[in-house]
Image (cartoon, helix red, strand yellow):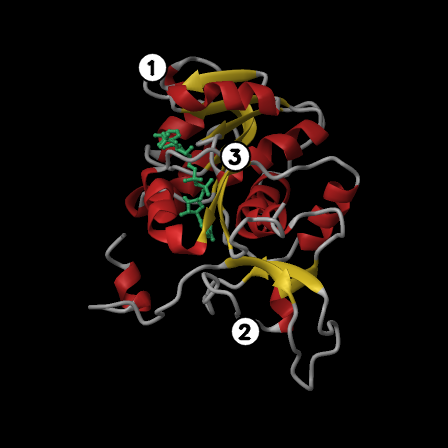
Amino acid sequence: MPFINRLIGGLLKPKKQILGSDIAGRIEAVGKEVTRFQSGDEVYGDLSGAWGGFAEYVCAREGFLALKPAGMTFAEAAAIPQAAMLAVQGLIDKGMIRQGQRVLINGAGGGVGTFAVQLAKLYGAEVTGVDSAGKLDLLRTLGFDHVIDYAKEDFTRSGQQYDLILDVKTDRSPFAYARALNPGGIYATVGGSMVRLLQALVLRPLIALNGKRKIRIVGLKQNKDLAYMNELFEAGKIKPVIDRLYRLEELPEAMRRFGEASHQGKVVISIEPDHAESR
Ligand SMILES: NC(=O)c1ccc[n+]([C@@H]2O[C@H](COP(=O)([O-])OP(=O)(O)OC[C@H]3O[C@@H](n4cnc5c(N)ncnc54)[C@H](OP(=O)(O)O)[C@@H]3O)[C@@H](O)[C@H]2O)c1
């Protein structure tokens, strides 16, 4: 889903038999042109496009990988790449977050949101998180100043306005989001309904006419900010939120939980039977 993915991923059956994008592990062997790594190095990164991550061994281009800090577990490292890059690129690159802004994160309890709130707090932002009722306690412990249960309240109709909105679930018209922005504010979406994303693309010049409100779409630059994440992690400023570790043979159950979005933070598959290496 959506159906358009079949044009890239295979019309009748998946072209790639082994999925899995975010990986962490120890290098077993390197090709002769590899200069940045050697066998034994502990690395992590996002292999989306190449895939193959749900496995004991995977082959990766060196440009997709970064060294894992010694204090970071493999599970923490595997939780970082795609979600954290979307949070960094949504809030900082597209959202241009500034000190003390009012920020709202829609879909706050998943992978992107749980990184985004930690980043926004580094900027001294006042952060509101929107998610389902069962995730609001987690949001409070992560540092959200305000939380909204999306089943009870529509943040685009509350009369509140924000300087920056980061959305992982774009499912409303761009005019609704513009209503929740202060003049000059930025709405940055990382994903959601295809129709709504297309509307955002087409209607954003019109929205900019009203109070210079900006609608921006994040195109993932995979692995771009892993060095920044290492820096924040080592300084104790960011910590991945892990819902649960699953064993490789539990992958179908893990994917089901992820598909239902009942997870909080990230779901991680551990290759070690007792998870010992992952912790
Ligand atoms: N831009 C790019 O290049 C790019 C690349 C890769 C991925 N993506 C996108 O990045 C996003 C992944 O985000 P993620 O990993 O954080 O997802 P996630 O872990 O699935 O989290 C999404 C959260 O949103 C909540 N939610 C569901 N419906 C909602 C609603 N109507 N209003 C508010 N919250 C709602 C879910 O909780 P409940 O289900 O409990 O409500 C869940 O906690 C996806 O949209 C994906 O398509 C974009």
Is 93 left, or right, of 8 in this rendering? right
Q: Position of residue 265 (x, y in %)?
A: 50, 36
**Which residue bears the numbered disc 2?**
59
Cα gap from disc 3 to disc 1, whole angstroms: 19 Å
Q: In this view, does 31 lie above or below 3?
A: below
Q: Position of residue 83 (x, y in %)?
A: 53, 46
Q: Quadrant of ligand 1?
A: top left
Q: What element carries label 3?
A: helix
Q: In this view, does 14 lie above or below 175?
A: below
- Mark nearest the camera among 3 and 2 is 2
Residue in the picture at 47% in, 64% down: 55
Residue 152: which disc? 1
**Is ligand 1 closer than 8 angstroms to the Cβ of mark 3?**
yes
Tell me the quarter of the picture where residue 13 sits: bottom left
Residue 40: which disc? none
Residue 113: which disc? 3
Upstream in sequence: badge 1 or badge 2: 2
Query: Is 158 or 142 nearer to us in this picture?
Result: 142
Q: In the displayed orientation, state which residue is furthest to the bottom.
A: 32
* Residue 130 visible, this orientation: yes
Q: Is residue 4 above or below residue 114?
A: below
Tell me the quarter of the picture where residue 18 sits: bottom left
Q: Where is residue 133 in the image (x, y as percent from the top left)?
A: 39, 19
- Mark nearest the camera among 1 and 2 is 2
Q: In the displayed orientation, state which residue is furthest to the left.
A: 12
| Mark 1 residue type | Lys
* Residue 161 visible, this orientation: no
Query: Is 138 or 54 nearer to us in this picture?
Result: 54
Q: What element carries label 1?
A: loop
Is 194 left, or right, of 226 in this rendering? left
| Mark 3 residue type | Gly
